[in-house]
Image (cartoon, coloured by chain):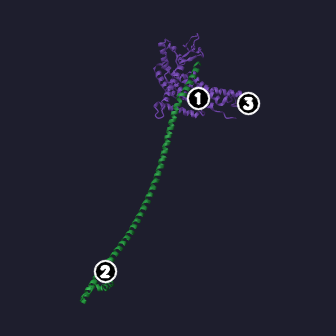
Chain colours: A purple, B green
Amino acid sequence: MADEALTAGQYIKHHLQNMTYGQHADGTWGLAHTVEEAKEMGFMSINVDTMFWSILLGVMFLWIFRRAAKNASVETPSGLQNFIEMVIEFIDGSVKGGFNGRNAIVAPMALTIFVWVFLINFMDLIPVDWLPGTMAWISSTFFGADPHHVYFKVVPSTDPNATFGMALAVFMMTMYYSVKIKGLKGFVGELTLHPFSSSNKLLQLVFIPINFMLEFVALIAKPLSLSLRLYGNMFAGEMIFILIAIMYGGGWALGIFGGFLQLGWAIFHILIITLQAYIFMTLTIVYMDLAYQVPDEH
Amino acid sequence: MNINLTLIGQSITFAIFVWFCYAYVWPPLVHALAERQKKIADGLAAAERGLHEHELAEKKAAEHLKDAKGQASDIIAQAQKRASEIVDEAKGDARTEADRIKAGADAEIAQEINRAREQLRQEVVTLAISGAEKVLKREVDKEAHANSLDELAAQL
Protein backbone atom coordinates (compact mmCIF):
# COMPACT_ATOMS: atom_id res chain seq x y z
CA MET A 1 0.00 0.00 0.00
CA ALA A 2 1.45 3.34 -0.96
CA ASP A 3 1.89 5.76 1.83
CA GLU A 4 -0.06 9.00 1.19
CA ALA A 5 2.97 11.04 2.10
CA LEU A 6 5.02 9.50 -0.71
CA THR A 7 4.73 10.05 -4.43
CA ALA A 8 4.85 6.99 -6.64
CA GLY A 9 8.44 7.75 -7.55
CA GLN A 10 9.50 8.09 -3.94
CA TYR A 11 7.64 4.91 -3.08
CA ILE A 12 9.51 2.95 -5.72
CA LYS A 13 12.84 4.48 -4.76
CA HIS A 14 12.17 3.69 -1.14
CA HIS A 15 11.56 0.07 -2.00
CA LEU A 16 14.70 -0.22 -4.05
CA GLN A 17 17.06 1.03 -1.35
CA ASN A 18 18.90 -1.40 0.86
CA MET A 19 19.41 -0.93 4.55
CA THR A 20 23.04 0.10 4.37
CA TYR A 21 25.44 0.27 7.26
CA GLY A 22 28.65 2.21 6.85
CA GLN A 23 30.59 5.36 7.60
CA HIS A 24 28.76 8.66 7.22
CA ALA A 25 30.36 11.71 5.64
CA ASP A 26 30.99 13.16 9.10
CA GLY A 27 32.99 10.10 10.14
CA THR A 28 30.41 8.43 12.36
CA TRP A 29 29.22 4.86 11.66
CA GLY A 30 25.56 4.02 11.28
CA LEU A 31 22.70 3.21 8.93
CA ALA A 32 22.17 5.40 5.89
CA HIS A 33 19.04 7.53 6.25
CA THR A 34 18.71 8.55 2.61
CA VAL A 35 19.57 7.11 -0.76
CA GLU A 36 22.28 9.74 -1.19
CA GLU A 37 23.83 8.88 2.14
CA ALA A 38 24.03 5.23 1.19
CA LYS A 39 25.70 6.17 -2.08
CA GLU A 40 28.29 8.30 -0.29
CA MET A 41 29.31 5.40 1.93
CA GLY A 42 30.97 3.81 -1.07
CA PHE A 43 32.41 0.33 -1.03
CA MET A 44 33.13 0.14 2.70
CA SER A 45 29.54 -0.41 3.71
CA ILE A 46 27.30 -3.39 3.96
CA ASN A 47 23.69 -4.10 3.10
CA VAL A 48 22.35 -5.37 6.39
CA ASP A 49 19.02 -6.57 4.99
CA THR A 50 20.60 -8.59 2.16
CA MET A 51 23.03 -10.26 4.51
CA PHE A 52 20.36 -10.88 7.15
CA TRP A 53 17.85 -12.53 4.83
CA SER A 54 20.34 -14.53 2.83
CA ILE A 55 22.04 -15.90 5.93
CA LEU A 56 18.71 -16.56 7.66
CA LEU A 57 17.39 -18.47 4.64
CA GLY A 58 20.68 -20.27 4.11
CA VAL A 59 20.82 -21.39 7.73
CA MET A 60 17.19 -22.48 7.51
CA PHE A 61 17.99 -24.57 4.44
CA LEU A 62 21.05 -26.15 6.03
CA TRP A 63 19.22 -26.78 9.31
CA ILE A 64 16.35 -28.61 7.63
CA PHE A 65 18.63 -30.62 5.37
CA ARG A 66 21.04 -31.38 8.18
CA ARG A 67 18.18 -32.66 10.31
CA ALA A 68 17.08 -34.94 7.50
CA ALA A 69 20.67 -36.09 6.94
CA LYS A 70 21.15 -36.86 10.62
CA ASN A 71 18.00 -38.94 10.82
CA ALA A 72 18.44 -40.45 7.38
CA SER A 73 17.23 -44.02 7.58
CA VAL A 74 17.62 -46.65 4.92
CA GLU A 75 14.59 -48.66 5.98
CA THR A 76 11.86 -46.18 6.81
CA PRO A 77 12.31 -42.69 5.40
CA SER A 78 10.08 -40.11 7.06
CA GLY A 79 8.02 -37.58 5.12
CA LEU A 80 10.69 -34.91 5.40
CA GLN A 81 13.37 -37.34 4.32
CA ASN A 82 11.33 -38.36 1.31
CA PHE A 83 11.05 -34.77 0.20
CA ILE A 84 14.74 -34.09 0.81
CA GLU A 85 15.68 -37.26 -1.06
CA MET A 86 13.56 -36.13 -3.98
CA VAL A 87 15.53 -32.86 -4.12
CA ILE A 88 18.82 -34.72 -3.70
CA GLU A 89 18.01 -37.13 -6.51
CA PHE A 90 16.99 -34.28 -8.77
CA ILE A 91 20.26 -32.45 -8.10
CA ASP A 92 22.28 -35.65 -8.39
CA GLY A 93 20.68 -36.38 -11.76
CA SER A 94 21.45 -32.87 -13.01
CA VAL A 95 25.05 -33.08 -11.86
CA LYS A 96 25.57 -36.55 -13.32
CA GLY A 97 24.09 -35.38 -16.60
CA GLY A 98 26.06 -32.15 -16.87
CA PHE A 99 29.34 -32.74 -15.11
CA ASN A 100 31.74 -35.36 -16.40
CA GLY A 101 34.66 -34.81 -14.06
CA ARG A 102 35.21 -36.33 -10.67
CA ASN A 103 34.72 -33.76 -7.95
CA ALA A 104 32.71 -34.36 -4.81
CA ILE A 105 32.06 -30.67 -4.20
CA VAL A 106 30.04 -30.01 -7.35
CA ALA A 107 26.89 -31.80 -6.24
CA PRO A 108 26.71 -30.19 -2.76
CA MET A 109 27.43 -26.84 -4.38
CA ALA A 110 24.62 -27.38 -6.88
CA LEU A 111 22.28 -28.34 -4.05
CA THR A 112 23.22 -25.26 -2.04
CA ILE A 113 22.74 -22.99 -5.04
CA PHE A 114 19.41 -24.47 -6.03
CA VAL A 115 17.76 -24.47 -2.62
CA TRP A 116 19.32 -21.29 -1.36
CA VAL A 117 18.57 -19.26 -4.47
CA PHE A 118 15.07 -20.69 -4.54
CA LEU A 119 14.43 -19.66 -0.93
CA ILE A 120 15.92 -16.22 -1.55
CA ASN A 121 13.77 -15.77 -4.64
CA PHE A 122 10.76 -17.03 -2.75
CA MET A 123 10.92 -13.92 -0.57
CA ASP A 124 9.70 -12.07 -3.66
CA LEU A 125 6.28 -13.69 -3.25
CA ILE A 126 5.72 -12.08 0.13
CA PRO A 127 3.70 -8.89 -0.49
CA VAL A 128 6.17 -6.05 -0.94
CA ASP A 129 5.07 -3.97 2.02
CA TRP A 130 4.67 -6.58 4.73
CA LEU A 131 8.22 -7.00 5.93
CA PRO A 132 9.48 -3.45 5.18
CA GLY A 133 6.32 -2.10 6.80
CA THR A 134 6.83 -4.24 9.88
CA MET A 135 10.46 -3.15 10.03
CA ALA A 136 9.52 0.54 9.70
CA TRP A 137 6.92 0.15 12.44
CA ILE A 138 9.38 -1.57 14.79
CA SER A 139 12.11 1.02 14.17
CA SER A 140 9.83 4.00 14.57
CA THR A 141 8.03 2.59 17.62
CA PHE A 142 10.97 1.20 19.55
CA PHE A 143 13.96 3.11 18.23
CA GLY A 144 12.38 6.41 17.33
CA ALA A 145 13.49 6.28 13.71
CA ASP A 146 11.73 8.16 10.91
CA PRO A 147 9.70 5.41 9.13
CA HIS A 148 10.26 7.07 5.76
CA HIS A 149 13.96 6.60 6.12
CA VAL A 150 13.94 2.99 7.22
CA TYR A 151 14.96 0.97 4.19
CA PHE A 152 14.42 -2.75 4.12
CA LYS A 153 14.74 -4.95 1.06
CA VAL A 154 13.71 -8.52 1.70
CA VAL A 155 14.74 -10.21 -1.55
CA PRO A 156 18.53 -10.58 -1.54
CA SER A 157 18.58 -11.61 -5.20
CA THR A 158 17.30 -8.15 -6.18
CA ASP A 159 20.53 -6.82 -4.72
CA PRO A 160 23.32 -7.21 -7.31
CA ASN A 161 25.76 -7.64 -4.45
CA ALA A 162 24.20 -10.95 -3.55
CA THR A 163 24.05 -12.38 -7.05
CA PHE A 164 27.53 -11.07 -7.94
CA GLY A 165 28.84 -12.46 -4.70
CA MET A 166 27.57 -15.93 -5.50
CA ALA A 167 28.70 -15.75 -9.11
CA LEU A 168 32.11 -14.56 -7.95
CA ALA A 169 32.46 -17.56 -5.65
CA VAL A 170 31.43 -19.90 -8.47
CA PHE A 171 33.84 -18.11 -10.82
CA MET A 172 36.69 -18.53 -8.40
CA MET A 173 35.91 -22.22 -8.06
CA THR A 174 35.94 -22.69 -11.82
CA MET A 175 39.21 -20.78 -12.13
CA TYR A 176 40.79 -22.82 -9.36
CA TYR A 177 39.80 -26.13 -10.90
CA SER A 178 40.69 -24.95 -14.41
CA VAL A 179 44.23 -24.28 -13.32
CA LYS A 180 44.33 -27.42 -11.19
CA ILE A 181 43.17 -29.73 -13.96
CA LYS A 182 44.79 -28.15 -17.00
CA GLY A 183 47.80 -26.71 -15.31
CA LEU A 184 48.71 -23.04 -15.56
CA LYS A 185 50.11 -23.61 -19.03
CA GLY A 186 46.97 -25.29 -20.26
CA PHE A 187 44.80 -22.58 -18.75
CA VAL A 188 46.80 -19.77 -20.34
CA GLY A 189 46.90 -21.72 -23.57
CA GLU A 190 43.16 -22.01 -23.54
CA LEU A 191 42.95 -18.24 -23.21
CA THR A 192 45.50 -17.38 -25.90
CA LEU A 193 45.65 -20.15 -28.51
CA HIS A 194 41.99 -20.22 -29.47
CA PRO A 195 40.10 -19.71 -31.67
CA PHE A 196 42.82 -18.59 -34.13
CA SER A 197 45.94 -20.64 -34.37
CA SER A 198 48.64 -21.03 -36.93
CA SER A 199 51.70 -23.18 -37.42
CA ASN A 200 53.58 -20.04 -38.47
CA LYS A 201 55.27 -18.77 -35.30
CA LEU A 202 55.11 -15.10 -36.33
CA LEU A 203 51.47 -15.32 -37.29
CA GLN A 204 50.73 -17.11 -34.06
CA LEU A 205 52.34 -14.27 -32.15
CA VAL A 206 49.95 -11.87 -33.83
CA PHE A 207 47.00 -14.10 -33.03
CA ILE A 208 47.74 -14.35 -29.31
CA PRO A 209 46.48 -10.90 -28.26
CA ILE A 210 43.44 -11.25 -30.51
CA ASN A 211 42.65 -14.66 -29.03
CA PHE A 212 43.19 -13.36 -25.55
CA MET A 213 40.80 -10.46 -26.09
CA LEU A 214 38.08 -12.79 -27.37
CA GLU A 215 38.59 -15.51 -24.77
CA PHE A 216 38.95 -13.10 -21.88
CA VAL A 217 35.61 -11.50 -22.71
CA ALA A 218 34.08 -14.98 -22.88
CA LEU A 219 35.63 -15.85 -19.53
CA ILE A 220 34.39 -12.70 -17.79
CA ALA A 221 31.00 -13.00 -19.44
CA LYS A 222 30.34 -16.24 -17.54
CA PRO A 223 30.06 -14.90 -13.97
CA LEU A 224 28.63 -11.64 -15.26
CA SER A 225 25.80 -13.30 -17.16
CA LEU A 226 25.27 -15.76 -14.32
CA SER A 227 24.68 -13.03 -11.78
CA LEU A 228 23.00 -10.50 -14.04
CA ARG A 229 20.46 -13.05 -15.27
CA LEU A 230 19.30 -13.81 -11.76
CA TYR A 231 19.48 -10.21 -10.63
CA GLY A 232 17.67 -8.92 -13.71
CA ASN A 233 14.84 -11.40 -13.50
CA MET A 234 14.28 -10.92 -9.81
CA PHE A 235 14.63 -7.16 -9.99
CA ALA A 236 12.09 -6.97 -12.80
CA GLY A 237 9.70 -9.23 -10.92
CA GLU A 238 10.07 -7.18 -7.76
CA MET A 239 9.52 -3.98 -9.74
CA ILE A 240 6.25 -5.30 -11.13
CA PHE A 241 5.11 -6.22 -7.62
CA ILE A 242 5.96 -2.68 -6.49
CA LEU A 243 4.09 -1.16 -9.42
CA ILE A 244 1.07 -3.34 -8.66
CA ALA A 245 1.30 -2.29 -5.02
CA ILE A 246 1.08 1.37 -6.09
CA MET A 247 -2.35 0.62 -7.55
CA TYR A 248 -3.68 -0.03 -4.06
CA GLY A 249 -3.40 3.70 -3.44
CA GLY A 250 -5.55 4.56 -6.49
CA GLY A 251 -9.08 3.91 -5.27
CA TRP A 252 -10.99 0.72 -4.63
CA ALA A 253 -11.60 -0.23 -8.30
CA LEU A 254 -7.91 0.02 -9.16
CA GLY A 255 -7.10 -1.69 -5.87
CA ILE A 256 -9.23 -4.76 -6.64
CA PHE A 257 -7.77 -4.90 -10.13
CA GLY A 258 -4.33 -4.67 -8.60
CA GLY A 259 -5.19 -7.52 -6.25
CA PHE A 260 -5.99 -9.80 -9.18
CA LEU A 261 -2.88 -8.65 -10.99
CA GLN A 262 -0.74 -9.41 -7.98
CA LEU A 263 -2.25 -12.85 -7.62
CA GLY A 264 -1.66 -13.64 -11.31
CA TRP A 265 1.86 -12.30 -11.30
CA ALA A 266 2.70 -14.16 -8.09
CA ILE A 267 1.49 -17.45 -9.57
CA PHE A 268 3.54 -16.81 -12.69
CA HIS A 269 6.45 -15.76 -10.54
CA ILE A 270 6.52 -19.16 -8.81
CA LEU A 271 7.67 -20.52 -12.14
CA ILE A 272 10.28 -17.79 -12.57
CA ILE A 273 11.85 -18.13 -9.14
CA THR A 274 12.18 -21.90 -9.56
CA LEU A 275 13.47 -21.56 -13.07
CA GLN A 276 16.05 -18.94 -12.10
CA ALA A 277 17.30 -21.13 -9.26
CA TYR A 278 17.51 -24.06 -11.65
CA ILE A 279 19.31 -22.02 -14.32
CA PHE A 280 21.84 -20.69 -11.82
CA MET A 281 22.51 -24.25 -10.66
CA THR A 282 22.72 -25.73 -14.15
CA LEU A 283 25.08 -23.03 -15.40
CA THR A 284 27.30 -23.55 -12.39
CA ILE A 285 27.46 -27.26 -13.23
CA VAL A 286 28.23 -26.44 -16.86
CA TYR A 287 30.98 -23.98 -15.92
CA MET A 288 32.52 -26.56 -13.59
CA ASP A 289 32.34 -29.09 -16.39
CA LEU A 290 34.10 -26.67 -18.72
CA ALA A 291 36.80 -26.20 -16.11
CA TYR A 292 37.33 -29.96 -16.20
CA GLN A 293 37.43 -30.25 -19.97
CA VAL A 294 40.88 -30.72 -21.33
CA PRO A 295 40.94 -29.38 -24.90
CA ASP A 296 41.89 -31.87 -27.57
CA GLU A 297 45.39 -31.30 -28.86
CA HIS A 298 45.94 -29.80 -32.26
CA MET B 1 22.06 -0.63 -5.97
CA ASN B 2 25.58 0.17 -4.75
CA ILE B 3 28.27 -2.40 -4.96
CA ASN B 4 29.83 -2.68 -1.52
CA LEU B 5 31.17 -5.12 1.04
CA THR B 6 27.98 -7.15 0.77
CA LEU B 7 29.55 -8.64 -2.37
CA ILE B 8 32.40 -10.17 -0.41
CA GLY B 9 30.13 -11.05 2.48
CA GLN B 10 27.87 -12.96 0.16
CA SER B 11 30.81 -14.81 -1.41
CA ILE B 12 32.06 -15.87 1.99
CA THR B 13 28.58 -16.86 3.17
CA PHE B 14 28.08 -18.87 0.04
CA ALA B 15 31.41 -20.61 0.45
CA ILE B 16 30.60 -21.51 4.06
CA PHE B 17 27.19 -22.87 3.10
CA VAL B 18 28.69 -24.95 0.31
CA TRP B 19 31.32 -26.30 2.66
CA PHE B 20 28.73 -27.19 5.30
CA CYS B 21 26.57 -28.89 2.71
CA TYR B 22 29.61 -30.75 1.38
CA ALA B 23 30.70 -31.90 4.82
CA TYR B 24 27.49 -32.61 6.71
CA VAL B 25 24.44 -32.68 4.44
CA TRP B 26 25.25 -34.31 1.15
CA PRO B 27 27.21 -37.46 2.15
CA PRO B 28 24.74 -39.00 4.65
CA LEU B 29 21.77 -38.45 2.36
CA VAL B 30 23.46 -39.83 -0.73
CA HIS B 31 24.82 -42.68 1.34
CA ALA B 32 21.33 -43.56 2.58
CA LEU B 33 19.99 -43.45 -0.96
CA ALA B 34 22.77 -45.62 -2.33
CA GLU B 35 22.37 -48.12 0.48
CA ARG B 36 18.64 -48.40 -0.08
CA GLN B 37 19.21 -48.89 -3.79
CA LYS B 38 21.70 -51.62 -3.07
CA LYS B 39 19.33 -53.29 -0.63
CA ILE B 40 16.52 -53.35 -3.14
CA ALA B 41 18.78 -54.66 -5.87
CA ASP B 42 20.08 -57.37 -3.53
CA GLY B 43 16.55 -58.32 -2.55
CA LEU B 44 15.48 -58.66 -6.16
CA ALA B 45 18.56 -60.71 -6.98
CA ALA B 46 17.87 -62.99 -4.01
CA ALA B 47 14.28 -63.46 -5.14
CA GLU B 48 15.47 -64.33 -8.62
CA ARG B 49 17.95 -66.78 -7.20
CA GLY B 50 15.28 -68.33 -4.97
CA LEU B 51 13.00 -68.81 -7.94
CA HIS B 52 15.76 -70.47 -9.90
CA GLU B 53 16.61 -72.75 -7.00
CA HIS B 54 12.99 -73.66 -6.61
CA GLU B 55 12.82 -74.67 -10.25
CA LEU B 56 15.95 -76.76 -9.89
CA ALA B 57 14.59 -78.46 -6.79
CA GLU B 58 11.35 -79.28 -8.57
CA LYS B 59 13.26 -80.81 -11.44
CA LYS B 60 15.36 -82.83 -9.01
CA ALA B 61 12.32 -84.02 -7.14
CA ALA B 62 10.71 -85.20 -10.37
CA GLU B 63 13.87 -87.11 -11.23
CA HIS B 64 13.97 -88.71 -7.81
CA LEU B 65 10.34 -89.73 -8.17
CA LYS B 66 11.03 -91.31 -11.52
CA ASP B 67 13.99 -93.24 -10.11
CA ALA B 68 11.96 -94.43 -7.16
CA LYS B 69 9.18 -95.63 -9.42
CA GLY B 70 11.63 -97.59 -11.55
CA GLN B 71 13.22 -99.14 -8.49
CA ALA B 72 9.84 -100.09 -7.08
CA SER B 73 8.78 -101.82 -10.26
CA ASP B 74 12.13 -103.66 -10.36
CA ILE B 75 11.63 -104.81 -6.80
CA ILE B 76 8.10 -105.97 -7.54
CA ALA B 77 9.24 -107.91 -10.60
CA GLN B 78 12.01 -109.55 -8.60
CA ALA B 79 9.59 -110.45 -5.83
CA GLN B 80 7.19 -111.99 -8.29
CA LYS B 81 9.97 -114.01 -9.83
CA ARG B 82 11.12 -115.16 -6.44
CA ALA B 83 7.58 -116.09 -5.43
CA SER B 84 7.08 -118.28 -8.49
CA GLU B 85 10.47 -119.85 -7.81
CA ILE B 86 9.41 -120.61 -4.26
CA VAL B 87 6.17 -122.13 -5.45
CA ASP B 88 8.06 -124.31 -7.93
CA GLU B 89 10.51 -125.41 -5.24
CA ALA B 90 7.64 -126.24 -2.92
CA LYS B 91 6.00 -128.28 -5.61
CA GLY B 92 9.21 -130.26 -6.17
CA ASP B 93 9.67 -130.80 -2.46
CA ALA B 94 6.11 -131.99 -2.09
CA ARG B 95 6.51 -134.37 -4.94
CA THR B 96 9.69 -135.99 -3.51
CA GLU B 97 8.11 -136.17 -0.07
CA ALA B 98 5.07 -137.84 -1.54
CA ASP B 99 7.31 -140.33 -3.38
CA ARG B 100 9.20 -141.06 -0.18
CA ILE B 101 6.00 -141.65 1.79
CA LYS B 102 4.64 -143.81 -0.98
CA ALA B 103 7.86 -145.84 -1.03
CA GLY B 104 7.66 -146.29 2.77
CA ALA B 105 4.08 -147.39 2.49
CA ASP B 106 4.95 -149.82 -0.29
CA ALA B 107 7.74 -151.32 1.81
CA GLU B 108 5.41 -151.66 4.77
CA ILE B 109 2.79 -153.31 2.61
CA ALA B 110 5.37 -155.74 1.27
CA GLN B 111 6.47 -156.54 4.82
CA GLU B 112 2.86 -157.07 5.84
CA ILE B 113 2.38 -159.36 2.86
CA ASN B 114 5.48 -161.34 3.82
CA ARG B 115 4.38 -161.54 7.40
CA ALA B 116 0.90 -162.66 6.34
CA ARG B 117 2.38 -165.19 3.98
CA GLU B 118 4.64 -166.50 6.76
CA GLN B 119 1.66 -166.80 9.09
CA LEU B 120 -0.34 -168.39 6.37
CA ARG B 121 2.45 -170.81 5.74
CA GLN B 122 2.61 -171.77 9.41
CA GLU B 123 -1.09 -172.23 9.49
CA VAL B 124 -0.98 -174.25 6.30
CA VAL B 125 1.81 -176.37 7.79
CA THR B 126 -0.18 -176.88 10.93
CA LEU B 127 -3.25 -177.66 8.89
CA ALA B 128 -1.30 -179.99 6.66
CA ILE B 129 0.21 -181.73 9.61
CA SER B 130 -3.14 -182.11 11.30
CA GLY B 131 -4.60 -183.22 7.99
CA ALA B 132 -1.84 -185.69 7.53
CA GLU B 133 -2.26 -186.89 11.09
CA LYS B 134 -5.87 -187.42 10.38
CA VAL B 135 -5.11 -189.09 7.07
CA LEU B 136 -2.52 -191.38 8.57
CA LYS B 137 -4.61 -191.79 11.64
CA ARG B 138 -1.58 -192.06 13.62
CA GLU B 139 0.57 -189.81 15.45
CA VAL B 140 3.33 -188.47 13.52
CA ASP B 141 6.41 -187.77 15.43
CA LYS B 142 6.81 -184.12 15.10
CA GLU B 143 10.37 -184.38 16.19
CA ALA B 144 11.21 -187.00 13.60
CA HIS B 145 9.58 -185.28 10.70
CA ALA B 146 10.40 -181.71 11.64
CA ASN B 147 13.06 -181.49 8.95
CA SER B 148 10.87 -182.68 6.16
CA LEU B 149 8.05 -180.43 7.38
CA ASP B 150 10.34 -177.34 7.46
CA GLU B 151 11.43 -178.16 3.94
CA LEU B 152 7.86 -178.32 2.91
CA ALA B 153 7.05 -175.07 4.59
CA ALA B 154 10.01 -173.39 2.82
CA GLN B 155 8.71 -174.56 -0.51
CA LEU B 156 5.36 -172.91 0.03
Residue at disc 1, secondary structure: helix
Q: Are marks 1 and 3 in contact (CB under 8 Å)?
A: no
Residue under numbered circle 3: A204
Element type where label 2 sits in the image: helix
Mark 1 surroundings within 10 Å by alpha-carbon count, few (fewer than 14), some (14 through 19), many (20 or more): many
Determine which quarter of the picture holds residue A100. top right
Q: Secondary structure at mark 3?
A: helix
Q: Viewer-proximal residue, A90 or A109?
A: A109
Residues at marks 1 and 3, CA–CA distance in whole angstroms: 33 Å
Give, as a three-letter code, the residue at label 2.
Glu
Question: To which chain does the residue with label 2 belong?
Answer: B
Residue A284, label in figure: 1
Q: Position of residue A174 (x, y in %)?
A: 62, 28
The percent position of residue A200, horizontal first and vertical second, equals 75, 32
Between marks 2 and 1, how big is the CA–CA gap?
Answer: 146 Å
Category of crowding for the residue at label 3, using alpha-carbon neighbours closer than 10 angstroms: few (below 14), some (14–19), many (at least 20): some
To which residue does mark 2 refer? Answer: B118
**At label 3, which amino acid type do we have?**
Gln
Tell me: A193 left or right of B49: right
- Residue A47 in the image, given as x and y percentages of width and height: 55, 18
Q: How far apart in space, not on screen, are marks 2 and 3 (Cα)?
A: 162 Å
Q: Residue at x 53, y 22 (%)?
A: A55
Q: Are marks 2 and 1 on the same chain?
A: no
Q: Residues within 10 Å of mark 2 (few under 14, many from 20)?
A: some
The N terminus of chain B, quarter of image: top right
